[in-house]
Image (tube, grey):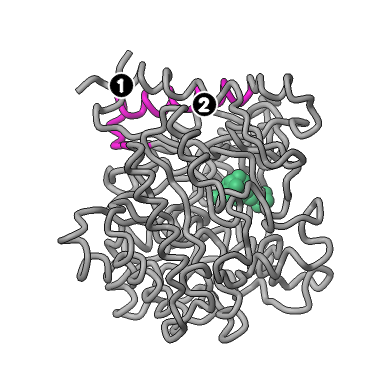
Amino acid sequence: MAALPSDFVWGFATASYQVEGAIDKDGRGPSVWDTFCKIPGKIADGSSGETACDSYNRTAEDIALLKSLGSQAYRFSLSWTRIIPKGGRNDPINQAGIDHYSKFCDDLLAAGITPFITLSHWDVPDELDKRYGGLLNRTEFPLDFENFARVCFKSFPQCKNWITFNEPWCSSILGYSVGQFAPGRTSNRDKSPVGDSTTEPWIVGHNLLVAHGRAVKVYRDEFKATNGGEIGIVLNGDATFPWDSSDPRDREAAERKLEFTIGWFGDAIYHGDYPASMRKQLGDRLPTFTPEEKALVHGSNDFYGMNHYTADYVRHKDGEPAPEDFAGHLETHPYNKNGDCIGPETQCKWLRPCAPAFRDLLKWLSKRYNYPKIYVTESGTSIKGENDMPLEKLLEDDLRYQYYDDYVKAMATASALDGVNVRAYFAWSLLDNFEWADGYETRFGVCYVDYKNNQKRYPKKSAKHLKPLFDSLIKKA
Ligand code: GBH
């Protein structure tokens, strides 16, 4: 059953702060995550990205691993502060950082692996946060990001696949409303002395969109003709089902959850404005696009970058939404009204595999945004208790193996039967790595990393499944 187009691309994904380590090497400056990890209690195991998988020092080893698994492409992110240690447009550029990533791209290409670069996967320069409030600054941040992007487009012409930001929802909501991610701002004074969950996440989301739009404009005006590649943003989005499908209020809530996560950014990019449901609930706490901003943001995706992991049952809430509500006045549940379970437990409270929902969400996105080209830029799962299993047992990661089998086949069905224009898939992640606030206890890798023994990598059963799986689904040219 061949159901994916012959030019379909698949591979594995990582992000700089989660895998690189070597945080002080070759002139790298600190990011907000270096600072956040130092605050006691923020990271589950008290760890940080200080060593992580040591990938900065093991590029050859990682490339050989990718090659051995048959990976056609590799999605990785740049550490902005390796390239511009202080981050700003008038700050010095660090040639050592550029040389590192330039060689990495060359080495990937020499191994037959296509680089997909994410410019910024949450590790915003700490200096910019201190200098002017980082993502909160509507003028300075987009200009500094634009400059960083230009330096990268100029320095890495061998890369043709560009992503501006990873999951702006997480930067905004988890960084400025919940306070679970760097820089950890929130109205919850038990967690942070600073922050305003009622306004800041919406300002940050807006500024990320404008910064994305600025980088895209630079790419299109100054580089696209010679580089010949593409650029887009990556959005997270869990699928939804109504808790009680016979209750119109739950059906609306399920739709509203998609609008508050995906539509927040997707509607701005594809339709030129925020969803009406968000405006209705948030009023003028949600910024308004100036004509100049709208021109930057509207139409700024060459492809839709989709990170997708899981699904929820959604139940409406009664009464008025709380001022700090960011979800759209609703609750999520692993069970529906009939007692059906969405999927098995994993190590993450938020993640339960449910492959049919992936097909549904691909359809939803395609319809809402007029059948854009979709790259699935992340998809994957943790496994309950994996960190405590003996090596022989955890290498037989059947739940993850089944996850990829089911999810990739659901995607292939959407491609073959639903008119969904999906053209790439990246498994998250190549390696077990620094899982942000969960530290190293939660593992997402298709390869096990032995942090106690020189970060040695061991492919799990799932790692070896992706090549035969895609070989069976991609049409022969
Ligand atoms: C991705 O985000 C990240 O891009 C990647 O760096 C990370 O390692 C990977 O997932 C695995 O976590 O706390 O109930 O509000 C995943 C998308 C969306 C997952 C928000 C957690 C928060 C749920 N994330 N979600 S909740």
- Position of residue 381 relative to residue 25, above or below, is above
Identify residue type, mark 1. Ala
Q: Quadrant of the C terminus?
A: top left
Identify residue type, mark 2. Tyr
Secondary structure under the numbered disc 1 in the rendered image: loop
Q: Quadrant of the N terminus?
A: top left
Residue at (27, 71) in percent of width and height = 218
Furthest-top residue in view?
A: 1
Horizontal relation, residue 31 to residue 110: left or right: right
Horizontal relation, residue 178 to residue 274: left or right: right
Furthest-left residue in view?
A: 225
Q: Which mark is residue 3?
A: 1
Q: Nearer the viewer, residue 131 or 252?
A: 131
Residue at (42, 19) in percent of width and height = 469
- Residue 105 x %, y %: 37, 51
Q: Quadrant of residue 313?
A: top right
Identify the residue position indicated by label 2 in the image. 404
Horizontal relation, residue 98 to residue 227: left or right: right
- Residue 126 x %, y %: 61, 75
Does the segment drawn in magenta span residue 422?
Answer: yes
Q: Which residues are magenta?
A: 399-424
> Within 10 angstroms of label 2, few (less than 14), some, or many (20 or more) residues?
many
- Position of residue 79 relative to residue 11, above or below, is below
